[in-house]
Amino acid sequence: MDASACGGNRHGAFRCLVLAVGLLASRAAPAHDFWIEPERFRLEAPGPVAVTLRVGERFKGESVPYIDAWIERFESHDGAGVRAVAGQVGDDPAGHVTPRTPGSSWIAYQSRDDFVELPPEKFRAYLEMEGMEYVLPLRAARGQEDAPAREYYARCAKALLHAPGAGGVEVEEPLGLTLEIVPERDPYGLEVGASFGVRLLYLGRPVPGLLVKAFTREAPEREEHQRTDADGRVRVTLDRAGTWIVKTVHMVALDGDTYGDWRSYWASLTFALPERVSVQPRGVPSPRVSARRSPSLTMRGHDSLPISAVANRMQKR
């Protein structure tokens, strides 16, 4: 936490104190998914959009405030370029964006590393649930099957907004997150029932064999599972309208690190699919249009705080 962000008054100091106490005293909450939740995905008119960061499961979870020490990247990408999403310590929603061009625009977030240590049986269950069984033989080869698993983890999240008209981003272009879900076409040009293709990139290269999960806020129990092919591609059927999340996890082994044996990256992509869409190609003007349980993984760290309790106490001051 940047101490300068606390300000020179009692209120600012109290905000930082409360957040610090939350960091030190909190116990981890169930934390599988991390996603970006803008107040709206489809914009009918220009204006700021509040951006909430959330951690939890199946669109249910705690909000994560703006803490600069936790953030590697927090950006807005539109047809006019890239801007950092600014904030102050404790802001919740974590930020606001105002797309400067019509068409589609990105909100992107990547956290800095956090750390968790899990008992071996819980680590195994977590690997099997997230489709990372490939780690198990590596653990065995290292003689770590019965040892606690020490893991760094980071979040790599994207949310796609859309405003009527053309001139936005090319959604097929990667943004450069460490692990990234890259659409092969703009989902705002698709109808319900369409096949939605994405690429999974780790350090800019395709990742085969990753388990990709997709579901909506409105029907989280209807979860689709697919594995990426040799080119890191997978297709998801957008069989209903609603707010969608597409997500995956990738883990790599570490050698020579004092504290950690593994590093995982948790990627997500959120967008909203209406019953019907009307999207024009780039450069073509268009008229205005009207447009939740799996076993828990417990993690310690910045995206598993009981933020709602902290925020409530802050608001009472």
Image (cartoon, rainbow, N blue to C red):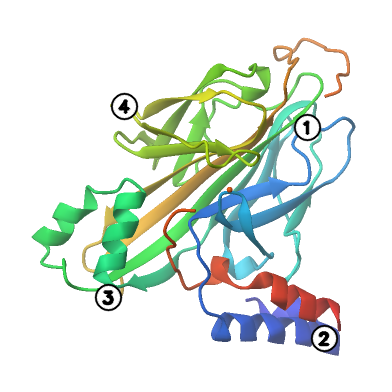
- The residues tagged by marks 4 and 3 sit, at their Cα atoms, a distance apart of 34 Å
Q: Which mark is residue 42?
A: 1
Counting residues from the start of the chain, the first of labels 1 and 4 encountered is: 1
Q: Is residue 237 above or below residue 258?
A: above
For the residue marked with disc 4, what is the amino acid? Asp
Q: Nearer the viewer, mark 1 or mark 3?
A: 1
Check if mark 2's residue and mark 3's residue have beta carbons within 8 Å: no
Q: Quadrant of the C terminus?
A: bottom right
Front position in the image: 188 or 192: 192
Residue 9 can be seen in this image = no
Q: Is residue 19 above or below residue 49?
A: below
Q: Secondary structure at mark 4?
A: loop
* Residue at the spot 74% in from the left edge and 36% down from the top edge: 41
Q: Is residue 12 above or below residue 161?
A: below
Q: Secondary structure at mark 3?
A: loop
Q: Which mark is residue 258?
A: 3
Q: Nearer the viewer, mark 1 or mark 2?
A: 1
Determine which residue is flagged by label 2: 8
Counting residues from the start of the chain, the first of labels 2 and 3 encountered is: 2
Q: Is residue 5 above or below residue 127?
A: below
For the residue marked with disc 2, what is the amino acid? Gly
- The residues tagged by marks 1 and 2 sit, at their Cα atoms, a distance apart of 39 Å
